[in-house]
Amino acid sequence: MILVLVAVERSIRNVMGNRNMKKPILFTTLGYPGSGKTFFSRRFAKDLRLFHLNSDRLRLEIFPNPNYTTPEHATVFRTMDFLTDELLQRGVSVIYDANSTKRIYRKRLQDIAKKRKADYVLLWFKTPTEVALKRIEKRSNLKSELMKRYHRTIDDEVLFGIKAEEEIPNKERHIVLGVGSYKKQKELVMNFLRTQG
C-alpha cells in the first residue's frame, strides 16, 4: 500500500501543471468491460494532464493475485475514493476508470466532488455487447505487460453480469460515448465541457 501511495505522489507531480481548468473535474466512467473506458481514459488523461485512476491496475498493485472477493472490492474502491478525494483537494482533476454501474457508487463519487468543490461528469460508454466481446477476446493476444495490467481477460458471463447491474444515469450530468474514434469521443467531451461550463 505504501508503494502505491509513493507512485501516486510521483504521478501527482506530473499532472499538477494543469491549470487550464477553473476548478478540478472528476470524470467517472460507466460501462462494462470492453466498452472502451480504459482506452479512452488513458489517452484523455494524458492529453488533458488528468490523474488516471484505473481500478484493475490498482487492484493488481494491492493484490498481485486478485480473487475479486467482496472484501477485496471494498479495499480497492476505498483506496480509489481516498486517492480521488486527496487529488481533488490538491486541485488535480481525476478520471475514475471503473465500471461504476450502480447509482449508489456514482453518488458516493458525486459527494466527494461536491465536498472538494469540483465538477462531476459521468462518461457513459454505450458499446454493443458483440463489440465488447470481440475486444475482450483480443486481450489474450496483448504483448505489453502494462497493457495486460489495464486490460484483464474475463469470461463472457462476467461481462453480462456487469451489464445486467448497470443502472442508467437519471439526473446525473453525463455524456454518452458510443463506438467511435478516440478523436471523436474527445471532441464530444470537450464540446460538452465548453457548453456546460
Image (cartoon, rainbow, N blue to C red):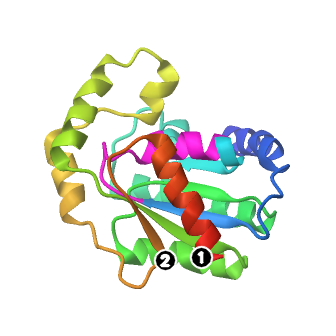
Residue for point 72% across, 76% down: 116
Q: Secondary structure at mark 1?
A: helix
Question: For this rendering, which residue is in front, 127 or 116?
Answer: 127
Residue kind at label 2, given as amino acid type: Arg
For the residues bearing labels 2 and 1, Cβ distance under 8 angstroms: yes
Q: Is residue 15 left or right of residue 190?
A: right
Quadrant for the N terminus in the image: top right
Residue at 27% over, 34% down: 135
**In this rendering, position of residue 141 left or right of residue 109:** left
- In front: mark 2 or mark 1? 1
Q: Is residue 120 magenta?
A: no
From the image, tell me which residue sits under label 2: 173
Where residue 139 sits: x, y (%)?
A: 31, 26
Q: Closest to the observer: 186 or 162? A: 186
Range covered by the magenta-colored residues: 30-46
Q: Which mark is residue 169?
A: none
Q: Which residue is mark 1?
A: 196
**What crowding class fits label 1: few (fewer than 14 Cα within 10 Å), some (14-19), or many (20 or more)?**
few
Disc 2 packing (10 Å; few <14; some 14–19; many ≥20): few
Q: Nearer the viewer, residue 92 or 56?
A: 92
The x and y percentages for residue 17 are 85, 49
Whether residue 38 is visible, yes or no, is yes
Q: What residue is shown at x 66% (from left), y 76% (from top)?
A: 197
| Kind of residue at badge 1 | Gln
